[in-house]
Image: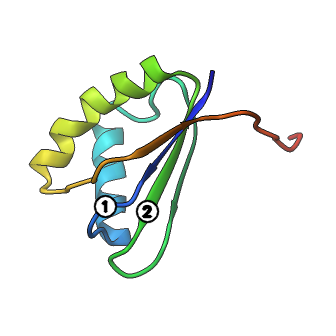
Amino acid sequence: MSLLARFAPPSMTAEQYDAIVARLYEEGIHPAPGLELEVCFGSGDQMKVSLLFDSQEEFEAFGARLQPVLAEMGMDPGRPEVVEVHNVIRRNP
């Protein structure tokens, strides 16, 4: 079953988010197996991130690789809200 993880860090700018994503690509962590969608939104230092994963196991595996990078970059992601997804509607390509 898919799950949605919503992160609302105490403070994160678009520049910090972009630096984190660039680092994850450099390290081969992104795109993570099972990651269906990542959305970053907000403004100023109140950026938030939502991740849609195919399974809890894939999300946890991503988290295990993500946490050391965030710690090294001095980013506190806060505790995510994690919910099971009932349905996802996608547009046709």
Please say which color scheme the image uses.
rainbow
Q: Which dot marks residue 66?
A: none
Alpha carbon distance from label 1 to label 2: 7 Å
Which amino acid is tagged 2? Lys
Element under disc 2: strand
Q: Name the residue carrying label 1.
A: 9
Q: Which residue shows up at 20% across the image and 55% down it?
A: 76
**8 above or below 32?**
below
Location of the C terminus (image quadrant): top right
* Residue 27: x %, y % from top left: 27, 34
* Residue 54: x %, y % from top left: 58, 24
Q: Is residue 27 visible?
A: no
Q: Name the residue carrying label 2.
A: 48
- In this rendered view, identify the residue nearer to me: 43 or 17: 43
- Residue furthest to the bottom: 44
- In this rendered view, identify the residue nearer to me: 48 or 85: 85
State which quadrant residue 83 falls in: top right
Crowding at dot 1, Cα within 10 Å, few <14 / some 14-19 / many 20+, comes out as some
- Residue furthest to the right: 92
